[in-house]
Image: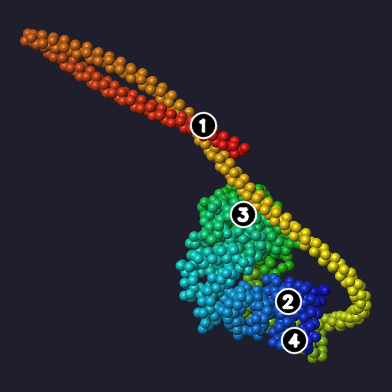
Amino acid sequence: MDVTLCLKSLLLAVHQHQDGGTVQTEAQLLRQLEETSVLGCGPLLSSGQQLPAECVSALLDVAGNPNSSSVLTGSIVTLLTLLAGDDSSRTILHSGFNLSGTLATIIQRSEPQEPLVLQCVQLLQRLSYNSSIFQSSSSVQQLVSFLITNIQSKDDVLIVPCLGLMANLCRRDHWVQSHIRSLDNVRSFYRTLLNLLDHNSLTVVVFSLSILAGLTLREEVGKKLFGPENIQQTFQLVFNIMVNGDGTLTMKYSVDLLVALLRSRQIAEYLSRFQHFSACVTRVLGLLKSKDPESAAKVLELLLTMCRVSSLRPLVCQVFFTPAGPRLRPADRRPGPEGKDQSGSGLVLVQWLSSPVEGAESCSLQVMQLLKELLEEALGGDAVSDWTLSFLDLLLPVLLDLLRTFKSGPDLDPRRVCIWTTHISSLLTLSLLCAQDSTRLLLGRQVSAPLCLSQVQTLLSCCHGNGSDGNRSVCSEAVLQMVELMSRLKHQVKDMETTFYRILQDHRMVTPLSLALTSHHREKVHRALSLLTEAAYLPDFPSVLLGESIAANNSYRQKEAELSVKPAALQEVPPTSILDRSGSNGSVSCLVEKVHNSLEVKDSHVSDIIQVFQLKEARLQDLVEAKALALSQADRLTAQYRLQLAQAQAETGQLASLLKEAELRREALQEELQLQVQVVERSEADAQELLQHNARLQSHSQEHQALKAAYNALLSRLNDSERLLKELQEKHGALSRNHELLTKSQEALQLQHHRLQEEKEEKEEEIKMLRSDLLKKSSNISGLQAELRVEEQKVEQKEQQRRDLEESLDLLRGELHKTEQARKEASIKASSLELQKIQVETKLQQKEEELNKHSAMIAMIHSLSSGKTRTEVNLSL
C-alpha cells in the first residue's frame, strides 16, 4: 500500500474513533496502526509534509485521552517509537508536538507494573537525550517524583530507563536540577545513587554518576565526590566504562559525563595531571577501529572537547603524534597484542578519511575538525617532530584525493561540497605552517592550478545559485578558504600565481568578499582583508561592486534587525483548524474572495491568510478523498467476504473427505506403529550389546592412556638426556677452546721465559765485566796511593808538584765514586732480574697446574659423553 494512502486511512480512522469511540472504531484504528507500523513511515515526519504532522497530532490527542484503552495507547506509543528513529524526527516530536508532556501524562495515569509505562519511559529517554524541557509544568514535577520513587525502589525492570531519563533531565535542565535539590528527600536520593555506584551493570553506574554530576557538581557533596581524593578513581572508572561498557548507549553516556565534567576548569586540571591519561586516550581511540559511526561520533566529540581545553590539548597531541611503543596501561586491563599500536594513533583518523563508512559523513567532518586542532598544536611550536612530518606526508595525499572527489555534479549536494571543501582547504592551508620544504614540495607536486581553478569556479557557481542565505554563507567561506590556499601556493605551483590573480579579478568574488567583510566572525574578516590587500592593486578588480555589495549587506542587516524588534501580526498559525468542518456553509474560495474584497489588512499579511485558507482547503479535500477511498474499500471488502464465504463452504466439503481419508490412514499408521515397536525392542537389545562393547573399548582406552603416559614419560626423559648431552657438548667445546688458548699462552710464556733468561745471562756478563773493571781501578788506586806517599816525602821540595798531584787525586776520587755508583746500580738490576725470574717460574707452575686440571676435566667429559651415548643407545633400543 502507498504510504500517503495509508496515512490518509489512518487519519480517517482516528477521526472516526474520536467521533464515535466504539469498539469497532477502536479495532479499525488498531488495524490501521499495525499497517502503518509495518510500512515504516519514519523519514516522512522530517520531510516537512503536512499529512504526517496531522496524523501525529491526532494520535497524540487519542493517546492523551484518559478514556483510551491501554492496548490502543500502547499501539500508538509503538508507532511513535518507530517514527522517532532518526535525530531530526526525534527533535520534531519532542519540540513540535510536546510528546514529552503526553507521555508523562500517560505514565501518571498508569500503574508502574504495566508494560506501557516501561515503553513510555524508554521513549521519553530517547526523546530527551541532548534536549531540554523548558517549561516548569506540573506534569514534569510529577514525572520527576515518579522517577525518584522508582529509582529508590530499585525495580530491576524500570531502574535502567528511569536512571537514563533522569540523567537526561539533570544534564541541561536547570529548572529540573533546582526542583530536585529543593525536595525534602534529596539526601536519601543521593545515598541511593551513591549505593548504585557498586551495581553490577556498568550502565547503571554511568547513569548514577551522570545524575550526581548534574546535581551535586557545585555543591558540597559534589566537591567530595569529584574532589582531588576521588577524582583519579572517577576518571579511571569512566574510561573503563567507556571502553568496556555494555553497548553504544553506555559509551555515549560515559562520553557525555566526561564532557560535562570537563566544563569545570578544576576537573580539567585534575585530568591533565591524571597519570594514566595517555593510556586511557589510547584505549578510547581503539573504539574508532570498529567502524561504528555512532560510537565514533561520540569518541570524536570527546577528543574535540579535550582539544578545546588548553591544558589537555598538548597531551592529546602527544598521544597522536608520538611513535608507537609500550605505554603505561591501567592496572585492571592486561596488555595484550592489541595494546601495541604498530601504526600510531593518528593513522586511525586518516583511515576514517581514506575509507569512510556509508552514512558516517558527520564523523569524517569531525575527524577533520580534530585534525585541525591537533595540527595547530603540533605545528605551532618552533620544532616539529619527525613523526608529525611523516604523518603529514601520509595525510596530504588523502586530503588531495578527497578534494578531487568532491566536485559538483548532479548527484552531489552543493552545500555538502562547500562544507567538505572548506575543511579540506583549511587543513591544507594549515599544513603549510610547517617549515619543512618537503611538505611544501609534496603539495606543489600534487596540487595543480587547473584543479584549484575548477574547484573555485564550482564554488562560485554554487554561491550565485538560487539558495538561502545560509548556503551562500557556507559557499562564500569555502571560496575564500580555497583562494587563501592558492595564495599560499602561488610560488610553489606552476601557473598558480596567474590563476590566483585571475580569480581575484572575477566579478563573482564580490559576493564572498562582501559577506566575509561584513561578518561577525573575526577569522572571516581577517581572511577577506588579507585577500583584499592583494586584489586592490589589480587593474580589473571590481572595487565599486564590492563597495555596493557591502552597503547592500549592511542595509539588509539593519532592516532585518528592525523587523526582528517589531511584533509580527501573524507569527504563528494555530494548530487547530480555522474553519469548522461540520458547520461551514460556504467554501474556502468564497472566504478568499471575502478577504480580498472586505477585510482591511496589510498587503504583507493578505498572502499569509490566503495561504492558510488554501492549506485548510487542501486538508478538507484530502479528507474527502480519504472518505471516498474508505467507501470503495468497504465495497471491496464486502465482495471479498462473499467470495471467502463460498470458498469456505467448498473447503468444508473437502475437509470432510479429507477426514475420512485420515481415518483410513490412521489405521494403517497403527499397524506401522506396532511394527516400529518391535523394531524398537530389537534396537534396545542391540543397544545393550553396544554398551558392553563400549565398556570393553573404555578399558582398552584406559590401558592405551596408561601406555601413552609411560611413553610420554620416556620421551620426556629422552628429551632431557638429549638436552643434557647438548649442554655437555657445548661445555666440552668451550673447554677445548680454553685449552687451546691456554696452550698458546703457555708457549708465549715459555718464549718470554727464554728471552728473560738470555737477558739475565747478558746482565750477569755485564756485572762480571764491571767487577773486573772495579778491581783494576782499585789496583790503580792503591798504586796511586803509593805514589802519593812518595810524593808526600818530596812535598817540601816540590810544592807545585804536590798541588798537581792533589788535583789529580780529586779527579780519581770522583771517578772512584762514579764507579761505585755504577756497581750499586748493576747489583740492583741483578737483584730485580732474579726476582722476575722467580715470578715467571711461579706463573709457569700455575699454568701447568691449570693445564693438568683442564686435561683431567676433558678426560672426564670424554668418559661421560661416551657413557651417555651408550645410555641413549639403550633407551632407543
Numbered label attached to residue 5: none
- Cβ atoms at labels 1 and 2 below 8 Å apart: no
Q: Residues within 10 Å of mark 1 (few under 14, many from 20)?
A: some
Q: Quadrant of residue 783?
A: top left
According to the picture, the residue beneath numbered tag 2 turns out to be: 79
Looking at the picture, tell me which residue is in the foreground, 852 or 164. 852
The residue type indicated by label 3 comes to Leu
According to the picture, the residue beneath numbered tag 4 turns out to be: 578
* Colouring of the image: rainbow
As measured in the structure, the alpha-carbon distance from the residue carrying label 3 to the one carrying label 1 is: 61 Å
Task: Decide: is 323 above or below 654.
Answer: above
As measured in the structure, the alpha-carbon distance from the residue carrying label 4 to the one carrying label 1 is: 116 Å
Looking at the picture, tell me which residue is in the foreground, 700 or 476. 700
First in sequence, mark 2 or 4: give its number: 2
Foreground mark, 3 or 1, reads 1
Q: Is residue 55 left or right of residue 868?
A: right
Locate residue 604, reporting x and y percent: 72, 81
Q: Quadrant of residue 590?
A: bottom right
Task: Decide: is 199 above or below 449.
Answer: below
As measured in the structure, the alpha-carbon distance from the residue carrying label 3 to the one carrying label 2 is: 43 Å
Foreground mark, 4 or 1, reads 1
Q: Residue at x 53, y 59 (%)?
A: 330
- Cβ atoms at labels 3 and 4 below 8 Å apart: no
